[in-house]
Image: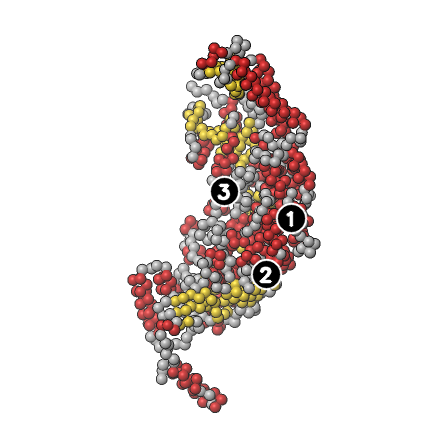
Amino acid sequence: MTSGPTPAMRQYYSVKARYPDAILFFQMGDFYETFGEDAGVVARELDIVLTSRGRDKNGDRMPLAGVPLHAADGYIARLVNKGYRVVICDQVEDPKTAKGVVKRDVTRVVTPGTLIDSSMLGSAGAQYLMAVAPDRKDTFGLAFLDVSTGEFFISSGSGGRDYADLVSEVVRYRPTEAIIPESLQGGLPGRLETLGVTVSRYRDDAFDPDAAYARLCEQFGTTTLEGYGCEGLTAPVAAAGAALRYAQETQQSSLPHISGIASRIPTGNMVLDAITLRNLEITTSIRGSGDGNTLLSVLDTTETSMGSRTMRSFLISPLIGKTAIDERLDAVEHFFDHALERQELRSILGDFSDIERIAGRIAYGNAGPRDLATLKESLECIPDVKSLFSDDAPLLVREALDAMSDHAGVIDLVGRAIVDDPPALAKSGGMIREGFNRKLDELRHLATTGKNWIAEFQQQERERTGIKSLKVGYNRVFGYYIEVTKPNLHLVPPEYERRQTLANAERYTIPDLREKEAMIATAEERLAALEAELYTELVRTLAAHVPDLQATARAVGLLDVYAALGEVAARYGYSRPVIEESGRIIIRDGRHPVVERHLPVPFVPNDTELDAAGDQIMIITGANMAGKSTYMRAVALCCIMAQMGSFVPARHATIGIVDRVFTRVGAFDDLASGQSTFMVEMLELANILNNATPQSLVVLDEIGRGTSTLDGCSIARAVVEFLHGKAVAGSRTLFATHFHDLIDLEGSLARVKNFHFAVKDTGSDVVFLRKIIPGATDRSYGVHVARLAGIPKKVTDRAMKLLKEASGREFSGGPRAPRYTQMLLVDPGEGVVEENPAVRELATLNPNDMTPIEALNTLCRLQKLANGEE
């Protein structure tokens, strides 16, 4: 018969019943212990030893795995990053004064979307919690909350095909956790998990629209959400209320630093869906190899964490208002033109800590002493920042400067309270500066002099007893003691009172030592308690300054971005774009901002002229590897950069505002959902054709290549005709293809123009010149590309022979008019090209001496001569 669980384990079972789906870290002394199934998970995921202790409810040995209290943050972060929820159950009373079992309670629930501790946050990027609330119209209200900074906004997404719009918002903001109603049915949870988002079901009542509205108003101290642009947005507000409630419950805090909310419904900005973000490699490499070869990696030369987050926000949500874009460009141009001012600002910003996250930790109450010290150092730099600018600075720069308070009160308080080199954690002690509190100074002096007395007492006893190895030590059980090794026991004075016997020594005490021990122990305990109390009060006082600190952090982030974009423009030779409310895109000497950074040779620039009412569609043909895909992506990236407020990699650019960029590039499949490469291509194409507007930019690369040639060519032709339509304007379109039959569309559709990439043909080899020129081609040079890729020579030689045979069969039916104007630059070193007799005769003719009928007859004869018919 087994005995029942201990009082401590009864506490454990009670807490575990409240959080059955989370891993419970249960404090027992200096360790957090996990039991049962939790212990198995922790041992496996953290690679620590799994032991056992006592018996569980069934009488079996209880699995046990624990981590030290002082190192727990690192272990918790690893679990959370793997998608687990961790419940922290701490001892909430002093074991020394507790009667019976020490009281414990849940102090925090750590989830992937609610991290706030600096030791757990893996990067300077935003750490969003997303909430999803279903709407009646097959759409979802979305809310995104970064608990570490207080950033809070709403959005929305469609529940249509494979949740495409919602997925785009997920890819744009990259939340780490999503909460959904418990009763939500359908495939959304699985879809979110495929994107790497941890999905947590949350009780339905948290998503009630009326309760959510009231909760948000209470949080912000208002009676309405109209001032935040959220009025009437039922589902997004429901999601926001649920996100706030979830964060408050997990953090066991009201989270006062969450003091407002913004609306980022996609219609207010250029729309970049998940497919476009992937294809253009805006923030993540298309091959999933990290962020190293992305547009963000090129532009983000910011000096602060606030700036880095702001840069990403600008990039994934470009503006569509001309005035707002021009105001950003004015700010960037200011830093572009003032190099010295730019460098000085960036140098100062390099010393700034992450004010935004420190403010969040102050509001939550877990800011460390080192946080406060670095905050003070950052705030002291604000006058240096402001002194750099005159009154004629651009509007957005002045607004940012005005938003930066001097924070004299914070600087003074922290300066008086915190030592110059404080510990990272308050529980380490020693963070309050001497002179800040008189009582603390007295206790510190008593504790210090007491320790000095112990050292003096040890030396005195050595001299008095003649025991040179005598030492005074301390442990928690016996307190201070005098230790004498056994060879010296005969020298021990009679007044020494034995306390403990060891294998090689005896431990003693005397009345004077006991008296001093009581004084020292009391002083140190009171010192630690008072210092902790003073620090807690200090953080509580600073919490009143959190809104101003957040405003300053946002302003610093904006200045950092403007200066960084000015730096990039100056460093890489970018120019300010001209923004128009028109259908034109005119780029002179445009370059791909990412590709040019990784080329060993200079990038070959190209021109672009698109007009929704003029040259609307560019059909681009040419050799494989000639640069078609790079060219089209470069045009799209220039538009995105221009509308985010950046200079662009071109000698000149006029950008008619683009409301949405669509791309269909490359061959991808979705095996997890049973979709073939061609099906994925068609689904993406359907999204483009159903949603593109005359203000959109459409980039299509090799439409129809995933099926038979006849089917693919027919689909590609129909797509061009659809995008062209019968209206006087349409979506500006870049259409790269190897279906050369499409080039005759230029003659039948008014707004279609042919272009191709020039190639230098030596007869035995080709050189890709990377230059786009008017006209078309029907040659792809695929065999040459295969040879460059390392395909065995036997294969490429055979392929070339088959190609010539096929070409011969194609032309065996008789002569046909040329369908292309490929620029073939023949290498003169390979021999002399014989001149056509028609050309020689044409050079001798004088049209002024001919009658009209003679000219017509001569033209017919020359045509036959040119075709070899005479």
Q: What amino acid type should be assigned to the residue bearing mark 2?
A: Arg
Q: Nearer the viewer, mark 1 or mark 2?
A: 1
Q: Which mark is residue 370?
A: none
Name above or below for residue 814 compared with residue 103: below
Residue, disc 2: 576
Tell me where residue 91 appears, x and y as whole percent: 55, 27
Tell me where residue 47 appears, x and y as whole percent: 43, 35
Q: Secondary structure at mark 2?
A: loop
Q: How is the image coloured?
A: secondary structure
For image coordinates 44% across by 25% down, the residue present is: 53
Name above or below for residue 734 compared with residue 368: below
Viewer can see residue 477 = no
Q: Which mark is residue 198?
A: 3
Task: Return the disc, 1 or 2, that comes first in the chain's sequence.
Answer: 1
Circles 1 and 2, Cβ within 8 Å, touching? The answer is no
Tell me where residue 769 appears, x and y as whole percent: 44, 66
Quarter the N terminus occupies: top left
Q: What amino acid type should be assigned to the residue bearing mark 3?
A: Thr
CA distance for labels 3 and 1: 41 Å
Q: Nearer the viewer, mark 3 or mark 2?
A: 2
For image coordinates 45% across by 58% down, the residue present is: 600
Q: Is residue 642 left or right of residue 837?
A: right
Q: Nearer the viewer, mark 3 or mark 1?
A: 1
Name above or below for residue 516 compared with residue 297: above
For image coordinates 63% across by 27% down, the residue present is: 530
Viewer can see residue 298 = yes
Q: Which mark is residue 385?
A: 1
